[in-house]
Amino acid sequence: MSLAFFGTSEFGAAVLRSLVERGRVKVSTVVSQPDRASGRGRRSGSPPVADAARELGIDLLQPEDASASPPQAEAGIVVAFGQILRDPLLTAYPLFNLHPSHLPRWRGAAPVERAIMAGDPDTAVAVIGLVADLDAGPIYGMEPISIGDRDDAGAVRARALELGVPLLEQAAAGGLHPRPQSADGVTYAHKLTPQDRLLDWSRPAIELDRQVRALSPHIGARMTLDDRDLTVWVARPLGDGPEPGVITEPLVIGCATGALEVLELQPSGGRRMLAVDYLRGLRSPPERAA
């Protein structure tokens, strides 16, 4: 079967590479988003899926509107594509979507992040058929994924990749039969905003820990120490600590309840490092977090 692959993100690129390496299906065409300017320098950047297609030697399309001209294929696989699909593509051939959540919970753009932020003890990876309504299509298969109390988004996505790719292969080969998705228990994983990255010390430490883990290792949480902007990659909650925003050694920051110990961080414009190494380079220890 000749498949078209639609994707944009790092997770989509990982799925594409896994499908090609396993060799159980043939991806004939890759469709990704156009190159976009990003970062402070506004340099043009290529989506991870487009980079993967070039490395793998697969024909690549990057249209502004993928739905307008469906590529020739017998079926399509859609993973974190980022465009709303409509006719004629939506009905040109079967479209199978890999979605890392326990549908109908966390339909939408950021299911892994929202599940961790909410403190869900588990999630899943599902293969669904695409329909006009967002992530509401019939379920071809689903595998549960537990979320450990130290798991970050990278760990959950790794398990979703491991369990989800075989489901995609089976669905594309006609080996799985769909069942309607429940209309009960629907929640939406809204797209992440800059506000979602900001650590608020008036919240409980356990919630801030979830926030850090949900945003690692891809974008990171944000905080300010004595007017220095920092990205937080790894932290852990503590039962006791100082007042909210007050810092004690080594880098323990008080929260509404408990405290958050920052273990790995990255200064703006700098490299990722251990918190103790960052503190060692300062003339005086930071006094307050914002």
Image (cartoon, helix red, strand yellow):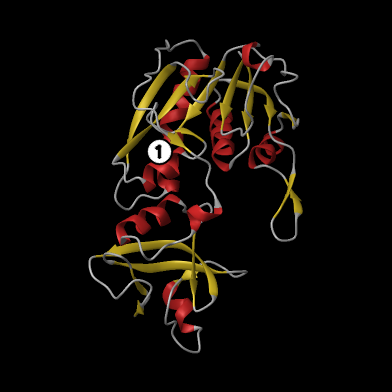
Q: Nearer the viewer, residue 231 or 17?
A: 231
Q: Secondary structure at mark 1?
A: helix
Q: Is residue 17 left or right of residue 118?
A: right
Query: Residue 20, position in %: x, y?
Result: 58, 29
Residue at 52 percent of width and 25 percent of height: 134
Q: Is residue 55 left or right of residue 129?
A: right
Residue at 58 percent of width and 13 percent of height: 94
Q: Nearer the viewer, residue 156 or 190?
A: 190
**Is the residue 43 above or below the residue 163 in the image?**
below
Query: Residue 119, position in %: x, y?
Result: 32, 46
According to the image, label 1 marks what residue?
A: 159
Q: Is residue 120 left or right of residue 39?
A: left
Could you tell me the amino acid type at mark 1? Arg
Query: Residue 123, position in %: x, y?
Result: 35, 35
Residue at 38 percent of width and 31 percent of height: 105
Quadrant assignment, res 242: bottom left
Residue at 27 percent of width and 73 percent of height: 241
Q: Nearer the viewer, residue 37 or 60?
A: 37
